[in-house]
Amino acid sequence: MQTTLVDNLRELDESRQTLKHLAQHDTLTGLPNRALFSDRLSQAVTQARRSRGRMAILFVDLDGFKGVNDHHGHHAGDWLLTQVAERMVSCVRAADTVGRLGGDEFVVLLASIEKEQDAVVVAEKIRVALKEAFEGEGLSLRISASVGVALFPDHGESEVLLSQSADQAMYQSKARGGDCVVLAT
């Protein structure tokens, strides 16, 4: 009977951990979702403010993603999003966070940077990585990305202002034809 109780408690704990993971992660890509990313952003801003450091947030929107779904179907689009997530994660440090806000919108938190150029270099690395063909599932797909970059404290001293600045910079990138990195002003 004791073993059964221990087994039941273990199962309950595993179920709680699974539910917590599902509540905080995108089900398709496994990346942090909006809620978890927001929490990490808040922590990073607090830490940067406390240490008088710098950090950055990148908004990444895929150019031409709708065409993938329209021409190849949603299965291909889902596969592409998982591949994009993997490539983006490979472009950042373990201490950084890549999240998916939904659809084809991703965000990157660079929790600690020395100078503006550090964030721009990572943004360019992501942009270039996403231009390479995605091969698999019997497909060869090409997309590009519009990336907006905002720095703390330069472009905002709160999570909301930083997010708005990065979002506006990303839309400026889109307005320039996409496939480029724009630093917030």
Image (tube, rainbow, N blue to C red):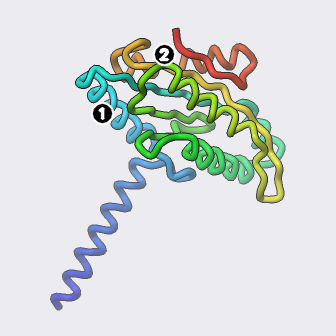
Above-or-below relation of 130 to 124: below
Q: Which amino acid, mark 2?
A: Ser
The residue located at (41%, 42%) in the rendering is: 95
Q: Quadrant of the N terminus?
A: bottom left
Q: Nearer the viewer, residue 152 or 13?
A: 152
Sequence-wise first label, 2 or 1:
1
The residue located at (34%, 36%) in the rendering is: 39
- Residue 70 % position (x, y): 79, 41
The residue identified by callout 1 is: 43
> Within 10 Å of the Cα at label 2, are there few (<14), some (14-19), or many (20+) other Cα atoms?
many
The residue identified by callout 2 is: 165
- Residue 176 % position (x, y): 72, 14
Which image quadrant for residue 60?
top right
The residue located at (68%, 30%) in the rendering is: 145
**Secondary structure of residue under mark 2:** helix
Above-or-below relation of 126 to 57: below
Q: Nearer the viewer, residue 93 or 137?
A: 93
